[in-house]
């Protein structure tokens, strides 16, 4: 339901992209999307679906098959998957559900929907090699505990290997 | 690092891949793992110039994950050593990328084009393994049992494998995700009893915590409830994220749901270390949030190990 210029409540027709399923099927991990026959094994075995009111892997797969691109990619629930791979291992059609979800997340990220936590981790990896900014105090404590010094990352080398990855510009955009 | 104590023959040697979350928040795991592996004659070489395994960024860019993982593997190849990780997420990622790139030449060439910028190349000549796979496959159960000088026969614990040590089976493959045996076998090698409970292979919820704390904590609570129901005195984990989920959050979960669990969460090498006769202090027990005095008191009755 949306409100139009005249203040009238209107119902927008669903936007359907019939090519969406082919787009996903061409991506690494999304190849077997069309095999899904909606048995629901993924959702019934999903630990997140047990406690979330909204996250339903079967539903995400169906919406993807139907071409509801915007609704799938803009949805916050897409980011709830814990990547436990229970759905992948138990799917009778070998859809690799968790990989399809990952492909959808990758696409959502490209469209600019990236939870802040991933931006932070990416920035930290480019800075230090580590996904978290490990405070000096921790490093000192480490050595006090008798552990060897933490290996130094080589951010320059990491940056070189990622130089041609166009994706970085989406992740590096901050605070959106 | 080789200690000329018991092991006359040189033990297996690995590059140790510590990952990010262990040095950030879970030092006790690293301390106890290094101590116990040392006793078992496993030689650890520090990983040079390594970077995050790549897993945290897989949700946003599969390509970046592949490059980061391949970079680590290429560095290990230069050293000519296999990798041991303490984090199952790192092990799973490195294994998966290693297998994928070995089998898919086109993708390997593509990733190598990126690595070339930093003078590196992935060839596929080393393996990556998690701690418990090294223990069961390379060290061997017999050697572990021999290292146990104070069997923990009075202790009853519950195992928690977590997901990435088991799934997806196609890539991890060394244990059965529906009925895992490795961790149970390793726990039993210490003399402790490993209890069965409901939904043993269920996820801890940690990966969702950044997106929905509520869902993640409910999952963690579910597991603590099932473990309490069978009377386990401790939960044994092998993953830094699972450990944070239960140990760091247990008090919070107790408050949130008005429950009392009081279940200490131990890293497996801490349990093994106790059975090897290493002191709780040396195994960094004081780094744990949930109080362990009860179970330690039982093990050390009259100042001696009981059992």
Image: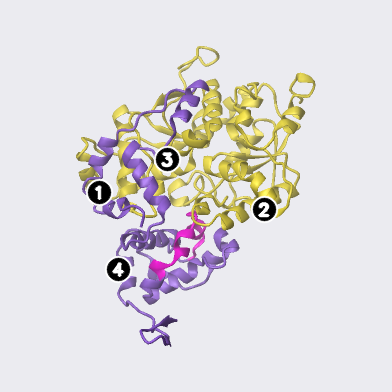
Residue A11 coordinates in the image, percent (x, y) = 42, 85
Q: For mark 3, what is the residue?
A: A132
Please report, as a chain letter, where disc 3 is located: A
Task: Determine the secondary structure under disc 3.
Answer: loop
Which part of the image, by quadrant, shows the C terminus of chain A? bottom left
| Residue annotated with mark 2 | B256
Q: Quadrant of the N terminus of chain A?
A: bottom left
Q: Which chain is purple?
A: A
Q: Are marks 2 and 3 in contact (CB under 8 Å)?
A: no
- B292 to the left or right of B179: right
**Horizontal placement of B126 versus A135: left or right?**
left
Identified at 34% across, 32% down, the residue is A153
Q: Is residue A80 magenta?
A: yes
Marks 1/3: CA distance?
A: 33 Å
Query: Label 4 near label 2: C-beta < 8 Å?
Result: no
The reply to whether the C-beta atoms of the residues labelled 3 and 4 are less than 8 Å apart is no
């Amino acid at each position: 339901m949306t409100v139009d210029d005249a203040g009238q409540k209107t119902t927008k027709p669903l936007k359907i992209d019939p090519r969406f399923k082919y787009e996903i099927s061409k991506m690494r991990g999304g190849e077997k999307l069309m095999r899904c026959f909606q048995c629901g094994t993924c959702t019934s075995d999903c630990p997140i679906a047990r406690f979330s009111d909204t996250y339903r892997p079967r539903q995400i797969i169906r919406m993807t098959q139907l071409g509801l691109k915007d609704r799938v990619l803009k949805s916050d629930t897409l980011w709830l998957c814990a990547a436990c791979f229970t759905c992948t291992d138990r799917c009778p059609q070998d859809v690799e559900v968790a990989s399809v979800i990952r492909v959808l997340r990758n696409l959502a990220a490209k469209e600019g929907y990236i939870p802040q936590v991933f931006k932070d981790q990416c920035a930290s990896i480019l800075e230090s090699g580590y996904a978290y900014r490990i405070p000096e105090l921790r490093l000192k404590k480490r050595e006090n505990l008798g552990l060897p010094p933490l290996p130094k990352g080589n951010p320059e080398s990491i940056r070189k290997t990622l130089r041609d990855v166009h994706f970085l510009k989406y992740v590096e955009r901050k605070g959106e | 690092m080789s200690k000329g104590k018991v092991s006359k023959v040189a033990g297996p040697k690995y590059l140790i891949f510590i990952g990010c979350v262990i040095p950030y928040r879970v030092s006790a795991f690293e301390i106890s793992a290094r101590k116990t592996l040392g006793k078992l004659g496993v030689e650890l070489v520090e990983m040079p110039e390594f970077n995050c395994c790549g897993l945290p960024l897989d949700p946003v860019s599969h390509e970046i994950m592949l490059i980061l993982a391949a970079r680590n593997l290429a560095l290990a190849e230069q050293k000519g050593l296999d990798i041991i990780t303490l984090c199952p997420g790192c092990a799973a990622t490195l294994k998966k990328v290693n297998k994928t790139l070995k089998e898919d030449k086109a993708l390997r060439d593509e990733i190598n084009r990126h690595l070339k910028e930093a003078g590196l190349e992935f060839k596929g000549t080393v393996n990556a393994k998690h701690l418990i796979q090294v223990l069961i496959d390379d060290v061997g159960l017999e050697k572990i049992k021999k290292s146990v000088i104070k069997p923990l026969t009075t202790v009853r614990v519950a195992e928690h494998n977590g997901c990435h040590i088991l799934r997806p089976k196609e890539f991890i493959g060394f244990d059965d995700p529906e009925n895992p045996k490795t961790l149970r076998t390793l726990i039993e090698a210490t003399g402790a009893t490993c209890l069965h409970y409901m939904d043993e292979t269920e996820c801890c919820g940690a990966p969702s915590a950044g997106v929905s704390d509520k869902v993640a904590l409910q999952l963690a609570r579910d597991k603590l409830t099932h473990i309490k129901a069978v009377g386990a005195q401790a939960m044994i984990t092998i993953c830094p994220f699972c450990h944070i989920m239960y140990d760091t959050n247990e008090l919070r979960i107790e408050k949130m749901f008005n429950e009392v669990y009081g279940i200490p969460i131990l890293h497996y090498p801490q349990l093994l270390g106790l059975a090897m006769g290493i002191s709780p202090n040396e195994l960094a027990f004081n780094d744990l949030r949930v109080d362990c005095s009860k179970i330690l008191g039982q093990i050390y009755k009259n100042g001696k190990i009981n059992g």
